[in-house]
Amino acid sequence: MVPKRVLLSDIDFYRNFLFLIFNHFNFEMASSVTTSLNFSNLESPKSNSSSLFEDSLFRWKRTPERAPSNNELVEHGDLENFEYSEPFVIKFHNICKGGGERVNGQPKMDVACQLDDFIEVPIKDAENCLECMTDDRILLDSVEIEVKICTTTCKLAIESILEKYAERRERCKSIVMVKRLVFFIYDLTYAKELAPILARIAPRACIVNLGIPKTKTFPLPPPIECRYVAEFIADFLRGRNAWQTIRVLRVFYFVSLDLNLQKILKKCVCLRHLTLSNVEDVGVFELDTVNSVLLDSCDFSITMMDEVFAEKHPRLFPNATNFGFHRSPISLCLKALKEWSRDRIADTRKTLCFYQPERDFRKFLFEASKLFEVVDDDNELEGEVQIKGQSGGCPLITVFNKDRVYKARI
């Protein structure tokens, strides 16, 4: 039996025809809009302002992305179980201006900056560059600031950019405090003027590094440099009450251990670790809050003041039980250890840890055995031995090699 053919009326035919055309038109429009939106998102992956960021991609160079190594982030005296992010880097430096322009026979130099992974950003574009970044980059809780130029004409521009960065952090929806701050300035003569701005950027920093090991600075007489460093530390701590939170302080500039520095650092009630590199003078000084001290000679030849520091370290830090000598001769560490080879009547410390600057213990044990008794060397291959002075009342000292890193407790 042949089924009956279903005939559509004219009204039904036109209704279905228009429905097909309408659906086809909507599909094309949706595809066009979707393509447009996807293209827009690809153009502006980091900012709502697509045109601004699109221009920056062609105008500013960027460093290749790489994951930071854990070894790079671990420093002697870092806080135990305390994590911080990769650093947000801000650098100011000179670059050679293109076009072959010369001044007094030398290539003309321009001042540029690095902001996070954007490099060689002209000073005039720095604020736009900061606006292009997303909040998650701006709010990294580790900040490294390097000022490698020595011209007073750029001082106002540098201050303006740092203030803009502080303002940009404050405008973010989330509140993330800077945990770690590294600050290097080539010319310390105007470091004090930047202290209030850095206090605004990192008002509750826990780890503060002043200077970078082995990095050249503008030559100043050591006593003058000590005064500038002390003034900067005082102004930074006073700016936003950072003295309440700072636990680790590393200073790679010249310092004078005197009453002035003692007065400044005694306000830091939570300070647990102190790293020094260049000791200009050892005077009347006593800091009883720190638990660990490191002298990092940065592979430079030791001075008479380094030896004075080694001799007087028990009195300078009466409550510290961890001492280290990094990138320095083994003789300096042995000189410090000698102070613990005899009974110190007024000292009640029973156990100590020393971090010696070499990996091999053979030379160390050969010299130390003249004054100390080796108590335990079973873990020598793991970089650890225990010694004790031959006279009664001496503390038990655990000595670690250069591969072991001390972690301070929060």
Image (tube, rainbow, N blue to C red):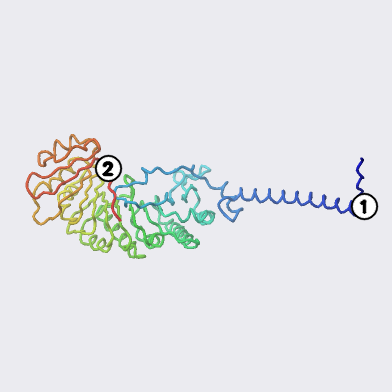
| Front of the two marks 1 and 2 | 1
Residue at 23% across, 63% down: 263
The one nearer the camera, 322 or 169, is 322
Residue type beneath disc 2: Arg
Q: Specify the label residue 9 is tagged with.
A: 1
- In percent of width and height, residue 291 lies at 23, 54
Residue type beneath disc 1: Ser
Residue at 17% across, 48% down: 310
Crowd around label 2: few <14 · some 14–19 · many ≥20 (10 Å):
some
User: Secondary structure under badge 2?
Assistant: loop
Q: Is residue 210 left or right of residue 154?
A: left
- In percent of width and height, residue 345 lies at 8, 55
Q: In which quarter of the image is the C terminus?
A: bottom left
Q: In this view, does 394 lie to the left or right of 109?
A: left
- In percent of width and height, residue 16 lies at 85, 51
Q: Specify the label residue 404 is tagged with.
A: 2
The one nearer the camera, 335 or 38, is 38
